[in-house]
Image: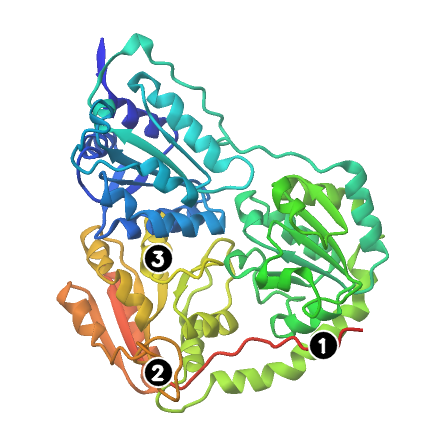
Amino acid sequence: MAVWGHDLLAQALKDQGVETFFFIMGAPMSSGEKAAMNLGIRGIDVRHEQAAAMMAHGYARVSNKPGVCMACSGPGTLNFGTGLATSLMDGVPVVALGGSSPIGEYGRGAFQEFDQLAAMKPLVKWAERVYEAHRIPEIVNLAFRQALTGKPGPVYLDFPSDILYAEVDEAKVVWPKIPADGHRVRPAGDPAQVEKALELLANAERPVVISGTGVLWSDASQALAQWVEHTGMPLYTTPQGRGVVPEDEPGQFPIARSTALREADVVLVVGTRLNYVFGQGQVPRFARDVKLIRIDIDPGELAITPQVDLPILGDARTVLNQLLAGAGERVSAARYTAWVKRLAGVEKERAPKFEAQLSTDQMPIHPLRLCKEIRDFLPRNAILAVDGQEILNYGRQAIPTFVAGHRLNSGTFGTMGVGLPFGLGAKAAKPDTPVLVLHGDGSFGMNGMELDTAVRHKLPVIVVISLNGGWTSDPERIKPGRDLGYTRFHDFAEALDCVGEYVERPEDIRPALERAAAAVAEGRTALVNVVTDHDARAQTVKFTRTMT
């Protein structure tokens, strides 16, 4: 019996557990997209392929499984680029499928002929082209394995048109066995290294735990929460890794973060890079004599951090459980009471001043006041996607997260335009969970037409825009290209059949958010356009400690 290549692709995706993919129609992938939808896989067509890759990213983050996107040949596939590069830098498993010109016409000037494989290789963890139709299930399986094994990341598969439209003898097709855990492996840490880590922590006086999204991908949130509860160690996460422990639980000292990192004598780093977010693990962000223990599933990550005193290669959940099993009373909360009391004092001293800043009634509205209103409005289980410059920094400071995986932002690549696509991908993954996207006005302009995607595919979210008239803060108005004007995004939203709200006064923010929530409850996307102070500039902590 003969079977088409595009039908093999659809069935291979179904067998991998794919439930949703994001795409823009176009040859030759249309045949594969239609075949996949015929098997019950949801196809969400978007307005730009960049957004398709970003939605797949948001979907993956929230669902903890690979997101999938598809595009036509040539420029369609090339448009994936920024989204996939973002996923690569953030370690997010996205499977991107691109159609391409037929193998049989390579080098003859076929329509949209372009070496897509070469173009995509620097942007992904792994890239390959399918040359034989009967191997489609095998190579799709390999793509998912590559996306999930070790440090997660995006992958790309190239599908020439003559492969998708080839007729194959079904008897020649080998269907791979797919593990129930979705290709994830959970290597344990070297027991000797784990014991050394416990000895370091037992002798510590001021330990801190730093975690990142490796904890999320390894399903280690519960293990990390148990570790923090047992040891009483202060926990600080990367911006993308927030929510692994609810941020209002006892022992969380967010305002004392700089003090905690600067004074810590031992730092346990779990599932995150020691990049610029943490000052590369060096002075002045950390003390010169700090001891660093790092747990990571990727040996390459451990190798590039020379400051680490004790590397442990392994799965975050497995190693945390090893540490818990060996901790006992020697590594427990009773050992660090003086340290916790010190950080609690810093938090208590600084919190009232920060809350006063959040509550300002100034006009134009200060972005911190906007963040406070969102903080007080959001339900605990809400998914928050934040995208922009000033508003990204203010949101990081002011809005907590209480559920693992429910915080999305542009990550270490600093990509603009991710907010709405991330939010829609998250909504597709968890349709019953409230989603709010907090945008700067500049970043919203990049993928704002995806409001149309939200409407057409019934993905109701709340979009809040901090409308400060342009890119970044610029009190002196000297930055070239800074000014964008005060765009009436609420009118734009209404033109796309969304609910639009315009806010100029701080006391009007909460009522507008309530009306937006009521619209979402009726299945409509809502946009709240809030005029904010163009002079407000978010500040980060300056580390100027004397090096002694």
**Which residue corresponds to mark 3?**
423
**Residue at the location (58% across, 49% down)?**
221
Q: Residue furthest bottom?
A: 362
Q: For numbered disc 3, what is the local secondary structure?
A: helix
Asked whether disc 1 touches disc 2, contact meaning CB atoms under 8 Å apart, the reply is no
**Residue at the location (31% across, 47% down)?**
80
- Which residue type does callout 3 highlight? Gly
> 2 and 309: which one is in front?
309
**Mark 3 and mark 1: span between their CA atoms?**
39 Å
- Which residue type does callout 2 highlight? Thr
Could you tell me residue 285's position as x and y percent? 67, 68
Residue 393, can we see it? yes
> 392 and 529: which one is in front?
392
**Which residue corresponds to mark 2?**
532
Rendered image quadrant of residue 166? top left
- Which residue type does callout 1 highlight? Arg
Q: Nearer the viewer, mark 3 or mark 1?
A: 1
The figure's colour scheme reads rainbow
**Mark 2 and mark 3: span between their CA atoms?**
22 Å
Asked whether disc 2 touches disc 3, contact meaning CB atoms under 8 Å apart, the reply is no
Where does the N terminus fall, quadrant-wise? Answer: top left
Residue 430, can we see it? no
**Residue at the location (42% across, 31% down)?**
143
Rendered image quadrant of residue 185? top right
Could you tell me residue 86's position as x and y percent? 42, 52
Q: Residue furthest left?
A: 495
Q: Nearer the viewer, mark 1 or mark 2?
A: 1
Task: Name the side, left or right, on which 373 lies relative to 412.
Answer: left
Q: For numbered disc 2, what is the local secondary structure?
A: loop
**Which residue corresponds to mark 1?**
545
